[in-house]
Each structure stands twice: as C-alpha cells, then as structure tokens.
Image (cartoon, rainbow, N blue to C red):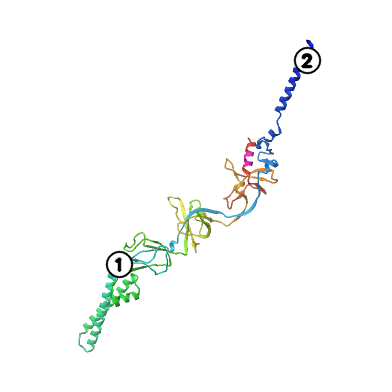
Amino acid sequence: MTHMNKHKGRLITGGCLLVAMLIAVCLRPSSTAANSTPVAARLTTQDTQSVTLSAQQARRVRVAQVVTRDFTPEVDAVGYVDFNQDGLAQVTSPYAGRVRQVFARAGDTVKKDQVLFSVDSPDLAQAEAALVSAAAARVQTASVLRRANGMAQVQANAPRDVEQAVSDQQTAEGNYQAARRALHIFGKDDAEIDRIVATRRIDGELRIKSPIDGQVSTRTIAAGDLVQPGGSPAPFSVSDANSVWLVANVTEDDAPQVHIGDALTATFPALPQQTIKATVDYVGNSSDASTHRVTLRAVLHAPPAGLRAQMLATYHIATEAPSKHASVPMNAVVREGSGAMVVFTTTDGRRFTRCPVQLGPAQDDYYPVLSGLGRAQSVATEGALFLSNALALKSQ
C-alpha cells in the first residue's frame, strides 16, 4: 500500500510538470505576433527630432532632391473681362423723336459714320424749314440789291434805297449761313444741305451714325420707339473690338505691392486652355467701401476668339523680379498642430530628421524655403505625414 502511494505521488508530480511546460509553450510569443507589433513601436530614435526606419518601412516613404528654383513674388486676385471703356461709345439721339428705321443689330461690325438708326425729329424739321426760308430770303434780297444797284446807275432811286438793299441782303446771308450751321449740328453734311435748298423738301429724318469703328455690343430700340436725349440705356453701344479691359480686384493689404507696369497673367474658367499675359496700366486710388478691394486693370489688345466681356477671370500679378530659393514639393510639407511647417530631411533614405522651415507662397506645386532648411539635400515627400505621426507617438 505504501509503495502504491509513492508511485501515485510520482505520477501526480510528473503530470504537474508536464502541464506547466505546456502552459509555458502556449504563452511564448510567436513570430507572427512579433511581426504584428505596431509600426510606431518598432521605430528607433537617436534623439527626439529624428526617426530611423527599417528597410520595409522605408519603402513607404518617397524622397525628393532639394532644388533651387526661381520664384516671383505675386499677388493673386479675381476679376472679370470688360469692354474697353476708352473705346466704348454710347450712341443716342441728341434730339427727341420717334425711331423711323434701325439699320444695325447687336453683334454687327460697323464703321465710323455708318448710320445705325434714324429718327423723325420735329427739331430737325424746324431747322430744315428755317434753312429753306433763309435760302429764299437770301435769293430775294440778292435780287433786290441787284435791282437797286441798276437803278442807282441811272439815278432812278435814292442812295438810301441802295443802302437798305445792302443791309437786307447781308441780314439774309447771315440767316442763311446760321441755318446751314444748325443743320451741321444735326449731322447733315454740305451735300445734304445743298439738296434741301435745291429741292425745298423738308424731311425731318435725323440719321444717327456710329462715332467709331467697332462692334455693336447692345441695341435697345426698335422702329416706332420714342427716344429722348440722355435716356438710359442708350439705344446703341458700340465697342472697340480690338481691345478689352482685364479688371482685377485686389485686397487692401495686397494693393500697395502692385504698381503700374507690373506683369499680369490671366486665366479664365470659361477658357481653361487660355492663358493671357498683359501689363497693369491702372491702379485705383481708392478702396471700395463694401468689398474693401482696390480695382486695377490692364488693356488687352487683339483679344483671342471666345473672350467676351463680363467673363470671370483669375489674375496673378508679378510685383517683383524673380529670386532664387531652395524649394521643396508641396507634399513634403507637414503643418503641425501648433501651426509650425516642417519637412523631414534625410541623407540615406532611412534616418529622417524633423526640420521646421519658413516658407513663401507656393508656385507650380513647390514652396520656396526662406529659412530653416540648412544644407539638406533630400526631403521626404510621400510619407512625410507618416513620419510626423510616428515621431509624435515616440515622443509620448
């Protein structure tokens, strides 16, 4: 019995050891578990500003060379295209009347002195009647003067009769010339005036002509409409088709940087393939009270086909000569929670060092580095945010 009890004790002790060994094996970390350790836990640091990656981790990060590029200080603005107001004519009738005929339509190309529309003008009819009357009085007084001079040669009248005839003829001549000048004001030329005198026909048709070569941009009248001098809108607007204004509105803060003669580059949402260059020739001397923006403009000569007034535009105004700066791609820059802008520099593609930098405005997907980069040759681009997060976790 005692022997059997001892044998059972050995079996129990052996079983306990076997169970303990199995538990130890089960609790030992496997190679798979080791590989599943979080990325941040597997990063090693030599200081609080650097991160060293394994070869596998480094494949997730792209590296780019720091290059020197030209950067031009610019002011950005939005605006629109407008008619060249220096070459825009608002054509209206100088006298009241009813529209008789309209000879041009919106979009037509017209020449200077081409008739746009005609008006039945009572004022013109009165002026033509005055001309016909003055012309008749001029002929009559001239005839009386000739007759008085003939009678004076044979002493058949008194000297004062000749003097009176001369006075009447001079008065009639003055009235006649004044009547002609009045019709010149209405736009009649000498040939038309002579025709009125010869035919004694009073028409009263006032023909309104284009004062410039250009394109009819608006037409607001039709036959039968009543027009008044100074009425709004004008019956016709004729614009210079060979030039337009590029109008930009810059903020009050940016306005002092812009000067006449600065180069301007314009792009248009409606013409995405079109980029236009011009020169600033006007900067406003006041700011709009509502928008707090200052207007500037450039004249664009020979505008491309498809560019129309009132199209929206985006402008870039070069305010200084280009300067060279070390540059980094935009995706190499990380904005930290504190607002600091940082890049991660490297010499071997494995060890990356946090580098706070001061940047200028981005151009062509690159930032100019104004300070902080030192002599770094390469920076992380794709994966820079991963490095920033890893460094933040390691510092906790």
SS state under label 2: helix
* Horizontal side, residue 20 vs residue 206: left or right: right
Residue 264 screen position, x and y as percent? 52, 58
The residue under label 1 is which amino acid type?
A: Ser
Is the Cβ of the residue at disc 2 closer than 8 Å to that at disc 1? no
Decide which of 6, 147 is in the foreground and name it.
Answer: 6
- Up the image or down, 133 lies above or below 91; here it is below
Q: Which residue is mark 1?
A: 121
Residue at 69% across, 41% down: 56
- How far apart marks 2 and 1 lie (CA) works out to 140 Å
- Up the image or down, 167 lies above or below 8; here it is below
Camera-side mark, 2 or 1: 2
Decide which of 186, 120 is in the foreground and name it.
Answer: 120
Decide which of 289, 63 is in the foreground and name it.
Answer: 63
Task: Give the image quarter of residue 213.
Answer: bottom left
Residue stretch rendered in magenta on the structure: 386-390
Q: Residue furthest bottom?
A: 154
Q: Which residue is mark 2?
A: 7
SS state under label 1: loop
